[in-house]
Amino acid sequence: MADSISISFTHHGNRHEFQFPPDSTISDFAEHVFSSLSIPQANQKFMITPKLGLLKYPFPDPVLPLSSLLNKKIVLLAPLPSELASLSDASAASKPRQRSFPIKAATPARHRDWRKAQDEATYTFGTIVPLPYLPNPEKSRRFLERLRDDAGIKASMRKHKFTVGVLTEMNPAEHTTHESRTLGLNRNRGEVIELRLRTDAYDGYRDYKIIRKTLCHELAHNVFGEHDRNFWDLTNAIEKEVEESDWRSGGHALTNQEFYNPDDSGVEGEHMDGGGWTGGEFVLGGNSTPLHGSTAQALSRRELMAHAAEERMKKQRDASKGSGA
């Protein structure tokens, strides 16, 4: 058709072809994808090859001519509407309980970095989804929220401009074999990240720092799919950034206090030793070369000591309040 251009792309293995006026832009393309496939622009990521790479909404150049994408391979990375609906249903089923105490009136802040606030709202996890059919989904929600609000994770996501559609937990029973345990998954470079929060017996939660380290690994898969040198360099950089922003491990504090779950016994619990990365997933066990070894054992002891110190400080504060001091 002489007065139009044809743009084809694939989504979840299905090929689509749309017709556009010759002066159409990539923003028009995103709007047409929304109207035709019911995929919101905020969830759209386009992998374009060769050269352009990953483009996501809002685009660096919103008026990029669609004619410049002719004869290029375009892959739409976005969850299906049915997947989004199921995640929304799961989130609604595990909605937090209503506060039973009055909320204090808000007071103006002395200073707020609006650029930082905007970046934190953009480069973050869009939805937190615990698994409602497992025990205590509210505890899992608080664990996932703690990861989302971790000062180091927030700082690294802002620096690398990472966005993740859904952060959810993994059912251990579905990712355990006699040889290995999968600790994390990143689907379609940031559509969904799954983390193994729970112990195999579902009686507690794994060590927070080990899970945070798994999250660092999965965030690196937003950029690199294969476990090559570039991937490991980025993973190591993210881990270093997160550690430097953790005031408990000698870094500087980015917020007044770290998110803390005072009633969640076991959140700081079980230590996992050894492990390795394989196939885009963080896998524990098998014949992999141990990644942590004695370093992980030392980390577990330090974590236990830090947790014990926090508990002592909490008890001292409670005692002071009780005595009216």
Image (cartoon, rainbow, N blue to C red):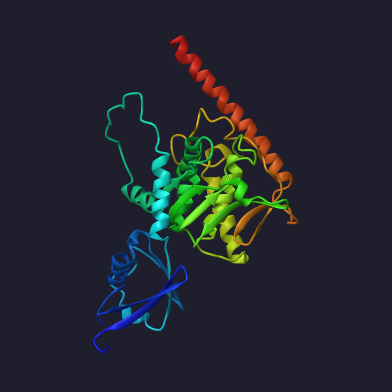
> Which of the image's four quarters has the N terminus?
bottom left
Q: Is residue 121 above or below residue 264?
A: below
Residue 153 in the image: x percent, y percent?
49, 48
Q: Is residue 283 above or below residue 72?
A: above
The residue furthest right is: 287
Residue 92 in the image: x percent, y percent?
38, 42
Q: Which residue is drawn at the image coordinates 42% and 51% (left, top)?
A: 86
* Front-lying residue, 72 or 160: 72
The residue furthest bottom is: 2
Q: Which residue is drawn at the image coordinates 74% and 44% (left, top)?
A: 294
Residue 81 in the image: x percent, y percent?
38, 59
* Front-lying residue, 61 or 57: 57
- Whether residue 230 is visible here, answered yes or no, is yes
The quarter holding residue 17 reads bottom left
* Front-lying residue, 251 or 27: 27
Q: Which residue is drawn at the image coordinates 30% and 77% (left, top)?
A: 65
Q: Is residue 236 left or right of residue 111?
A: right
- Whether residue 125 is visible here, answered yes or no, is no
Q: Which residue is drawn at the image coordinates 68% and 43% (left, top)?
A: 272
Q: Is residue 223 left or right of residue 37?
A: right
Q: Is residue 28 left or right of residue 276?
A: left
Q: How many marks?
A: 0
Q: Is residue 313 above or below residue 295?
A: above
> Which of the image's four quarters has the C terminus?
top left
Residue 133 in the image: x percent, y percent?
50, 41
